[in-house]
Image (tube, rainbow, N blue to C red):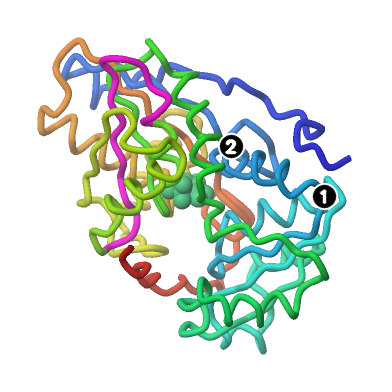
Amino acid sequence: MTDPAALRPALPSPLTEAADERFARHGVRLLLKRDDLIHPALPGNKWRKLAPNLTAAAGRPVLTFGGAYSNHLRAVAAAGRLLGFSTTGVVRGDELAGRPLNPSLARCAADGMRLLFVDRATYRAKDDPAVLAELLGQAPEGSTVVPEGGSNALAARGCAELGRELRGRADVVAVACGTGGTLAGLAAGLGPGQRALGVPVLRGGFLGGEVRALQRAAFGGPAGVWSLDERFHHGGYGRTTPALHAFADDFAARHGLPVERLYVAKMLYGLTVLADEGAFPAGSTVAAVVTGSPGPGDPGGPRDPGAEPPDQAAPPASR
Ligand SMILES: *Cc1c(COP(=O)(O)O)cnc(C)c1O
């Protein structure tokens, strides 16, 4: 059983209305695209990006990359357990090796993922053939490589289905961005008159180039209408602020939705600011993609008071 369809994802994901006066007072409807409900172990965009990559891997062992709190690593580890292929996770930060695993990495290990901790210089050089060969030498024979965050051409094409599910349903579709793979596909799948809005959670202003490169690889060139608003990273990847937590707690209470903090909360926060700025004309509909749910150790998930936030990830080398 190596076909990801065997995991019975709940697709298309539900699209629900969220009555929220912060939008209603501007005449704007807010919808929530509940990709977090696609699969309990492979939620959100992780399903959409991984499924085509796992089909291509056809049951071979998978080697992939992530930070200490990576949702992508958890999703790959869970898929390996559920579908019966072996997984290796290359983790950024060799100082983590001697310590007890944080709840996210503990979940990866419990799912059978072999964890390779590497220093930041090695992690940054992971696309170098010699570095990659050295890492593959520590993984099971015949391992296939899935890139950091699972974002490649296959992933972007998988995420185009998210856009197609939203055709005719909203004027603007907002998504939080890490590597940009989800935005690249979402924009390509939307219909005429619709646009995608990406909210990067990393600092650095490099994401536009990443999205363009992914669209070239996946679709042969620019696809759909999209833009980025770089103002809502709250300090960078893995960083949060008290204001962000207060916002997320309040949103969760209003809408009965546990709000993941590293991505989803930053996007929803950005949307409320944009609504106040008049960015959405009265009568328009904004759909917010709920790309995931709180993980182990996150607020709203099982608590881990000892967890430290990961470092600001280094922007990838420009292409
Ligand atoms: C991975 C992830 C993202 C970022 O997706 P990219 O395709 O890397 O931009 C957004 N939200 C959640 C919850 C995620 O886990």
Near mark 1 (Cα within 10 A), the count class, few <14, some 14-19 or many ≥20, is: some
Near mark 2 (Cα within 10 A), the count class, few <14, some 14-19 or many ≥20, is: many
Position in image of residue 179 (x %, y %): 42, 54
Which mark identifies residue 59?
Answer: 1
Query: Where is 47 relative to 70, above or below?
Result: above
Displayed quadrant of residue 241? bottom left
Displayed quadrant of residue 133? bottom right
User: Quick check: marks 1 and 2 in contact, CB under 8 Å?
Assistant: no
Q: Earlier in the sequence, mark 1 or mark 2?
A: 2
Displayed quadrant of residue 136? bottom right
Which mark identifies residue 48?
Answer: 2
Position in image of residue 292 (x %, y %): 53, 42
Position in image of residue 83 (x %, y %): 83, 46
Residue drawn at (52%, 83%) of the image: 122
Q: Amino acid at mark 1?
A: Gly
Residue drawn at (58%, 81%) of the image: 131
* Front in this rendered view, residue 104 or 46: 46
Q: Amino acid at mark 2?
A: Arg
Query: Would you say 56 lies left or right of 48 here?
Result: right
Query: Where is 307 relative to 14, above or below?
Result: below
From this viewpoint, which residue is outermost toward the left? 277
The residue stretch that appears in magenta: 187-203
Q: Is residue 192 magenta?
A: yes
Residue drawn at (79%, 46%) of the image: 58
Query: Where is 69 relative to 52, above or below?
Result: below
Query: Would you say 232 lies left or right of 9 here?
Result: left
Element on which disc 1 rests? loop
Query: Would you say 108 lies left or right of 308 here?
Result: right
Q: Is residue 114 magenta?
A: no
Residue 308 can be seen, yes or no: yes
Residue drawn at (27%, 50%) of the image: 208
